[in-house]
Image (cartoon, rainbow, N blue to C red):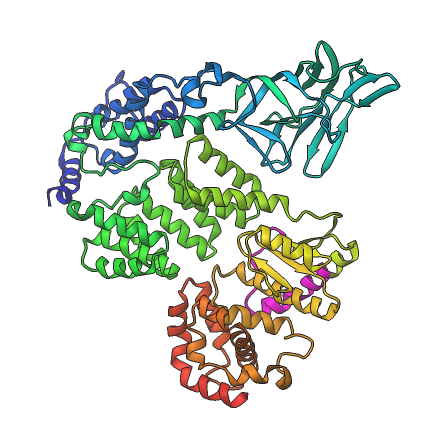
Amino acid sequence: MRALLRPVLLVAALVFAPLPVARAGDPAAPDFEKSLQRCRELVKAEQWPAGEAALRKVFTDFPEDPRVRARLREIEDQLKVCLFRRVQKPPTGEELFGPAAVKFNASLRDVEFFFAHPTEPLWTTSESGVRVLGVRFESTLVFEASSIRYLSAQDRVAAVFICYDIEKRGGYVVSPGYFRSTATGHVSADSGVRKIAASGTVELKNQASSASDYSDDVPLRVTRNGSDIQAFVGRKLVAKVSDRSYTSGYLGVVADSIGGITVKGRIDKHAFRKLVAEKYAERFAAWLEDGWSREKEIPDWARDSVVAAPDMTLSELPSDGPSEERAALTAMVEAAANGDEEEALHAAIRSAELPRLTGLYLRGVADLALGSHAAASDAFDELVAAEPEFVPARMFRGIARFHMRKVADARADIDWTLERRPRAAPAIVAAALIAIFEQDLLRADAVLARADSLGVLAGDLDEVRDWVHRMRRGPNFAQRFEHASDHFVVVSDHSKQVCVDAATLLESMQGQYAAALKPAPPGAPKARVYVFSGPEGYFDYADELYVQADSSAGVYLPMLRELAIWIPVDMTDFRDTVRHEGFHQYLHRHVDDAPLWFNEGYAEVMGGGGPEGIRNAARDGESVRKFVPVRELVAMKAARFMAIAEVTYTESRYLVDFLRRTKSAKLKTVLRDYFTALAAGLSHADANRKVLDPVMDVLEAEFKASL
């Protein structure tokens, strides 16, 4: 009760206390937001003593200010980091890399390695035989090998990969070449440098003279300095090029036998921060337990807030959260946020018994987990109005708004969250997903790079990073044709004409999709469509994406927002598939997750139902005899729907076709009303209750009569 009343008493004191009179020459009063921003900047710059002093000054400059209490979680987080890092010695090379690091400068990130042989744990060998050093470098790089076999028994010439950037899929291959004189002539291979890029490989102009006689065990030295890349065999300069395309990345070697390796370089700053964060994680946890005392570091008047690490937003509760139940309630929130529907239902029930703000919080998280995005958004709106600085409410509201396709509002909430909790993993994932939805891969890269620089570790982030990489890469077509229309970019390994035909067909369907649903929002990025010349490439691509595409002619990939289709012998089937998958893509722009009966049934109708049409007694008779009640079909979960797909797909197609053609006054607006409910953020169950349940008896009877 004391904690609940204190803000009221503070407001009363501010209202009734006489205001101080400003006098000429008085120093300007400190600005709370500017002071806090200064603290953030010092922490970001890793100026730990100065950051600690600035954070403590917040307490002295703003004594008993309710804004301090509202932002105490953030202040506390930063203070903990400053106190911890201030007492830590810089990490040594051996701590980070083991005994192979013979020299290391933590402030400059410069390192020198020596390896007798390229072996684990720092070196790994790929399936193609490339040995890769697991450290990312930037800027100047020197690679030396005192012994190397330049030519293998299979006549494969040694090579060194430098600055290989996995995300950009590019770098350089330095080939020292090979030259050996024999009694009857000589054996040789040209030296040079090739640039690898996503678009292909380019041989760079070699400015060095050709090498004279050399063979195995002549030392090799490869350097990267500025734009210059050079290779020396012994003292001979055998390759020299100038190129600035790739300045950071990994180092790899291809050679049958190599030893006495020295590598000197500067570690990439983002990779270094991640290394340090991982190294300090266990120490930080131990320090929190043994060396951190909130009672000693935070003034008594400000200690009404729970300790929460910046990437542990889900461990927070609103200001009226009951302290004795904090652990149980935050565990419930975390489980619901991770998709546990049972815990979400439990949270919804508990919300009615809790103080108002905490009840709103649990109810909002429960609604979000259960797909009731509109209800979740409303609950978080009310919570944000009551407690504007409660970060999780803004974060979850942003996620709910994104599901409702209020993308600009969602982005604003998530950006606000990350300003205050830059290491909040759920918010980082949401920011990346919004960027992916808007097809802004550069922004998605920036979000993920910042997470790396802050040392954020989360499985979801790795998965999102993998999707971004796959979106940028696309299928590995042997040949590539492309055509762009108003709304699509179609790429194929078949022909330019196939790209034009697919784009033209998709464009022609936009009006029909809009008439069935509603016009798409303007300014959306062009959707990608991949058309494979045959099933082999299509199924290989699906396997690579871990997509179950067995027996399918096409698929819409919501995470990547792309269509993938293969060309069958009968082009009628191809056109049906394009129209079918195009509907999925169009609906996804409006609704994040539509029920399968509506999504697949409508797509089947838009695709024409195949060569035989939407309804065909000879083709569909067996499935029609197995139709389930409509009430059961519309409530099916995905697993059961797909388990009897031959029946459910057919019944969904027949049901949507029936509802599009019905003359019944009670049923003729059902499809439009149902879509409107989904687009407004209602869950599948709520949409069923609002639109279908009131007419279900009529629908069951008239649909059955239409078969």
Q: Position of residue 424 (x, y in %)?
A: 37, 40
Looking at the image, residue 7 sits to the left or right of residue 591; the answer is left
Please state the extent of the stretch shown in magenta in the rendering. Answer: 502-528
Q: Quadrant where the C terminus lies?
A: bottom right
Q: Position of residue 312 (x, y in %)?
A: 32, 40
**Quarter assignment of residue 457:** top left
Residue at 23% in and 28% down: 62
Vertical relation: 448 (above or below) 555: above
Q: Is residue 529 magenta?
A: no
- Residue ranking furthest to the right: 184
**Quarter assignment of residue 12:** top left
Looking at the image, residue 577 sits to the left or right of residue 397; the answer is right
Counting the numbered discs, the total is 0
Foreground pick, 486 / 434: 434
Q: Position of residue 148 (x, y in %)?
A: 66, 19
Q: Is residue 320 visible?
A: no
Q: Is residue 461 visible?
A: yes
**Quarter assignment of residue 88:** top left
Foreground pick, 162 / 26: 162
- Residue ranking furthest to the front: 183
Q: Position of residue 75 (x, y in %)?
A: 28, 31
Vertical relation: 566 (above or below) 442: below
- Residue ranking furthest to the top: 235
Q: Is residue 522 magenta?
A: yes
Residue at 64% in and 85% down: 618
- Residue ranking furthest to the bottom: 705
Looking at the image, residue 7 sits to the left or right of residue 405; the answer is left
